[in-house]
Amino acid sequence: MKVGILISGRGSNLKSLIDACATPGYPAEIALVISNRPEAPGLGIARAAGIPALAIDHKLFATREAFDAELDKALRAAGVELICNAGFMRILSDGFVEAWRDRQLNIHPSLLPAFKGLKVHERVLEAGVRITGCTVHIVRPAMDEGPIVAQVAVPVQPGDTAETLADRVLAAEHKLYPLALKLVAGGHVRLEGERAIIDGAVAKAQAPLFVPDIS
C-alpha cells in the first residue's frame, strides 16, 4: 500500500515508519512525505532515505481549503492510498477529511478519548492519572476523534515532568505507529460503525500494550 506521510517538525515518528517499511514483508511503502513547514527537519530524514519529500507552505495560501486542495493534489499525483499524520500540526478541513475518509491515520499522545487536543502531558500530570499512553486512530473531522486502531499504555512515574513523560510516550509511539500501519495496510482492520475491528489471528494486537518503566 502506498502511504503519504504528513509532518510539521522533526520527523521522529516518520523515522520509525521509514524503518518499518524497510523491513522484509512489511505491507506498506512510503510514496511521499509532505510538510507544511519548509524548514521541518523531517524532510531531510525522508530525502536521506531516498523518499520524495515536498514542502507545501500553508502560509502561502489564503484559506485552509486552498492549502488542503494543494495537499490533496500532491498526494493523489504520488499514487497515495493511505495518509499517516505524523506530527502534522494543522487542522484539516472537513472536505479534505471526508475525501480521504477511512484512509487517514493519526497518532495522538494520550489514551483517547481522554486528553484530546494540545498540552496533553501537562494536563495528564495536573489530573493526577497513573496511566497515560498513545493512540493511533482513523481521522474524522472532529479533532482527535475516530475509530481507534491501536493503543499503548505508559505509566506516569513519581516526579515526572511534562518533558520526561513526553519522552516516554514518544518512545511508545515509535513502536505503536508501525504496528498500526501494518495492521491497516495488511488488510487486518475493518470498520463496524465507528469501531475498528482487528481480524482473525491478529485480533490480540488490538489489546492495549504496556510499556513498563520503573527506572
Image (tube, rainbow, N blue to C red):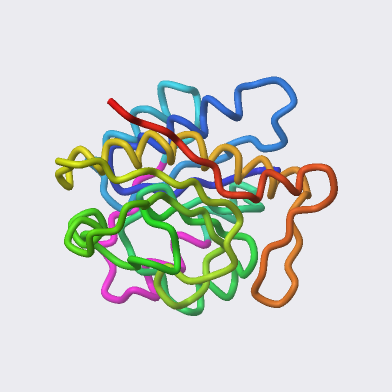
User: Where is residue 155 shown, x and y percent of the image?
Assistant: 35, 43
Q: Check the image and report above or below for 8 versus 118.
A: above
Q: Nearer the viewer, residue 159 or 112?
A: 159
Say left or right for 62 vs 52.
left
What segment is highlighted magenta in the picture? 54-72
Q: Residue at x 33, y 29 (%)?
A: 44
Where residue 23 sits, quadrant-wise, is: top right
Q: Quadrant of the C terminus?
A: top left
Residue displayed at 75% across by 43% down? 186
Q: Is residue 71 magenta?
A: yes
Q: How many marks?
A: 0
For the residue pair 189 and 205, the one nearer the viewer reads as 205
In the drawing, does residue 100 fall left or right of residue 165? right
Q: Position of residue 36 (x, y in %)?
A: 32, 53
Residue 24 highlighted magenta (yes or no) = no
127 relative position to 92: left or right: left
